Image (spheres, rainbow, N blue to C red):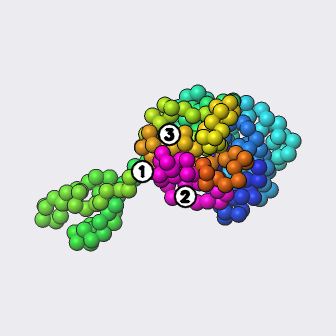
């Protein structure tokens, strides 16, 4: 999970995400709309009998506040909450498992802020079922073939691996750029990302406010997407002054056509 605003546990129910599916929470910065829901979610997990460890990745300043809240409201949890401090000034891998890595992206806001870059690890190639059947290759050898092995038939003929497999799908990546002023060089850290979420608080009509409050305009978000060569841009974090966010969408599309608006419970294919 990335960021945890108020009522997160209610939204999880609405979108039918099982609570035990959440193992790691990455908090971009310590403004309330990004972290006020954390203690409520932790409490709800405990009431529902969670036993699996929950990992929280955030600015070090959150740790004493979270401990204080846990001592006040969540004393009898049957699971552990493990805190991992983040350095918002560095781009570094902060999580890794067999399928992906998570890197921090240094951003510029009114207090320490970082985004997150999720990179899928390359997968193994796909087995060509018809070739396996034709050469009667036993199931026990399929994993070896996926890992690059050739196959030798009973008469000594070597079947090259390239004939037995097809290439895996290209690994996907998702970058989440939370509250930040426009950073002209940010695109270098996002080069080739599949899908980019970038805040777009204002339109160009409020460029001065964006600069003053360390936010970005929709057009600036599109510039980052264009320069990084991403495939898809998702806009979000709109100012309440805009009754119709399509104004922001239109500004972004002038620079980067493949742009969409984020809305509550929207689902996007990265």
Residue depicted at x 87% and y 41%: 72
Q: In whole angstroms, how far apart are the C-alphas of marks 1 and 2?
A: 16 Å
Per the image, the residue denoted by label 2 is 268
Distance from disc 3 to disc 2, alpha carbons, whole Å, reads: 19 Å
Q: Which residue is mark 3?
A: 224
Quarter of the figure with residue 84: top right
Location of residue 63 in the rendering, given as x and y in whole percent from the top left corner: 74, 34
Give the answer, above or below, for where 189 lies relative to 270: above
The label on residue 145 is: none
Residue sitting at x 23%, y 57%: 162
**178 horizontally vs 187: left or right:** right
Image vertical order of residue 157 relative to residue 226, above or below: below
- Secondary element under disc 2, as helix, strand or loop, is loop
The residue at the point 49 percent across, 48 percent down is: 254
Nearest to the eye among marks 3 and 1: give it.
3
Earlier residue among tags 3 and 1? 1
Q: Position of residue 18 (x, y in %)?
A: 66, 61
């Amino acid at each position: 999970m990335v960021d945890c605003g108020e009522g997160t546990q209610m939204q999880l129910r609405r979108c039918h995400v099982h609570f035990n599916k959440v193992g790691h929470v990455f908090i971009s910065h310590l403004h309330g709309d990004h972290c006020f829901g954390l203690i409520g979610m932790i409490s709800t997990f405990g009431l529902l009998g969670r036993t699996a460890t929950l990992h929280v990745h955030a600015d070090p300043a959150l740790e004493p506040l979270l401990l204080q809240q846990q001592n006040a409201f969540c004393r009898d949890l049957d699971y552990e909450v493990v805190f991992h401090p983040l350095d918002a000034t560095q781009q570094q891998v902060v999580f890794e498992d067999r399928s992906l890595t998570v890197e921090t992206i240094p951003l510029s806001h009114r207090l320490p802020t970082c985004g997150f870059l999720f990179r899928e690890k390359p997968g193994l190639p796909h087995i060509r079922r018809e070739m396996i059947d034709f050469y009667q290759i036993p199931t026990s050898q399929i994993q070896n073939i996926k890992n690059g092995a050739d196959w030798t038939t009973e008469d000594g003929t070597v079947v090259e691996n390239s004939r037995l497999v097809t290439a895996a799908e290209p690994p996907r990546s998702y970058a989440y750029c939370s509250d930040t002023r426009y950073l002209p060089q940010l695109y270098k850290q996002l080069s080739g990302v599949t899908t980019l979420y970038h805040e777009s608080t204002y339109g160009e009509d409020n460029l001065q406010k964006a600069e003053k409050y360390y936010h970005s305009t929709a057009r600036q978000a599109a510039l980052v997407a264009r320069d990084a060569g991403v495939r898809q841009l998702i806009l979000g974090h709109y100012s309440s002054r805009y009754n119709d966010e399509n104004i922001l969408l239109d500004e972004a599309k002038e620079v980067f056509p493949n742009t969409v608006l984020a809305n509550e419970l929207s689902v996007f294919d990265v």
